[in-house]
Structures are given as structure tokens and as C-alpha cells.
Image (tube, rainbow, N blue to C red):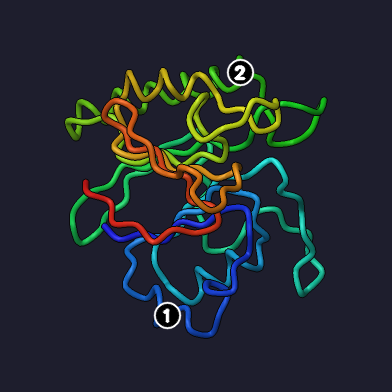
Amino acid sequence: MKVLAVSDQVVEIVYSSRIRQRFGDVDMVFSCGDLPCFYLEYISSMLNVPCFFVHGNHDVAEYSADGRLVLEPGGWVNLDGRIVCSSTKGGTVLIGGLEGSQRYRPYAPFQYTEREMTLKVWRMALSMMVNRLRFGRYLDVLITHAPPFGIHDDADLPHQGFSVFLKLMQRFRPRYLLHGHKHIYGLDTWRTRFGETEVINVYPYRLLELEL
């Protein structure tokens, strides 16, 4: 399955009149957060494929061209705390999502303590158990904003990953975890194997071939 994954920064190569020539053969698009609605809506309208997203910790409401206040991009499915079953030419793909980052400001939206994120993960557990009975696997792709603890993260709290993501990968074994949040440059590591899961930092965009 060929996917375009985006996160954290508007990039000219995507937000371009040539987007169809460059990315017109993708099967899906994933957004890992911290991107404006106008950018995501442009992508979905130009590529016309299933698009899935989670919010990042910097996402805010925006005014549309007709004056409406919007927080979610049109043409995209919000995956936070849920799992969807999507069909592609290669078969069925099970995709889940978890939004936000570690909580570093009181009452800020899209920020969670480790305990709060753990509760969100275990609320998804029933759906993953059902998937195991129905499809023979729990989850194929997990979309998050923050990385797992100790993988592609930093020591400071705002950029620290979630430990519960490690437990999720150990227990439910998704094939891929795609995240953003951590900006990377040069030779920074962006792809790491953890057990049976490939953890990929998609900042600011990645064109990926996912084997499912």
C-alpha cells in the first residue's frame, strides 16, 4: 500500500499545483497532526483518496473562507481513540489513531498525561480484540502525533513520548506506528524497529510503501 504521510509543517512540494503528478498514485493519506485545515483540505480535494488524521498539540480552530470556525478538515476522518477498517486494492487495512502530546500546560487541548493516554489506549483495546477474532490481527497501522517513549523523542516534557505506546506495540503488534511532533533534520533517525512494529517519524512528509 502506497501512502503519503504528513505532519507539523506545510511543505511546498505537497502544497503545489503538481501534487497529482507527484503523489497521484497513493492509496491513502495520513496526517499526524499540527497542520492547518486549508493544507489538509487541499490534499484531500486534489488526491481524492481516503484521508485519515489525528490532532497535534498545536492544532487550533481556523476561520474558513465563508467565515465558519472549523477545527477539523473537510474530507478527512478523525481517528483519535478509534479504529477503522478501510479497503484498498490490496485488501483490508485496520487503522487506529491517538492524538496529542504529553501535557505540559494545564487545560490545554490535545495534551494528555501518561495516565490519560493509557486510558485512551485501553478504551481501544476492545476494538482490537474484535479485530483479532474477525481478521486474525489486532491492528495494521497506528497514527499518532507524539512518538513512543524513548523512540524519536526528546528528554523535555513537551517532546517526550508516551510509555503506553510501547506497551501497545508489545501487546497488539501493529505493523506500523506513524508519528510526527518531533522535528528531525539531517542524519536524525526517523525509522526504528520495535518488536514487530516499524516506528516512522513522518515529519514533514514521507512517501511510504507499507507492506500489509
Question: What is the spatial separation of the Cα atoms under label 1 and label 2, in whole angstroms?
Answer: 40 Å
Q: Is residue 90 above or below residue 138?
A: below
Residue at the spot 64% in from the left edge and 44% down from the top edge? 56
Instruction: Tell me where residue 159 sits by quadrant.
Output: top right
Residue 73 shown left or right of residue 106 in the figure:
left
Q: Residue at 17% of width from left, 30% of height from top? A: 136
Give left or right: position of 107 versus 172.
right
**Residue 158 or 139: which is nearer the viewer?**
158
Q: Position of residue 168 (x, y in %)?
A: 40, 22
- The reply to whether discs 1 and 2 touch (Cβ–Cβ < 8 Å) is no
- How far across and how far down the image is residue 161, in percent? 57, 28
Left or right of 146 in this view: 200: left
* Crowd class of label 1 (few under 14; some 14 to 19; many from 20; radius 10 Å): some
Which type of secondary structure does the marked residue at label 1 adopt?
Answer: helix
N-terminal-most mark, 1 or 2: 1
Label placed on residue 11? none
* Image location (x, y in percent) of residue 71: 70, 53
Task: Indicate the quadrant containing the N terminus: top left, top right, bottom left or bottom right.
Answer: bottom left
Tally of numbered tags: 2
As drawn, the label of residue 114 is 2
Q: Residue at x 70, y 31 (%)?
A: 158
Badge 2: residue crowd in 10 Å (few <14, some 14–19, many ≥20): some
Looking at the rendered structure, the kind of residue marked 1 is Arg
Q: Quadrant of residue 2?
A: bottom left
Q: Which residue is mark 1?
A: 20
Relative depth, front residue between 93 and 146: 146
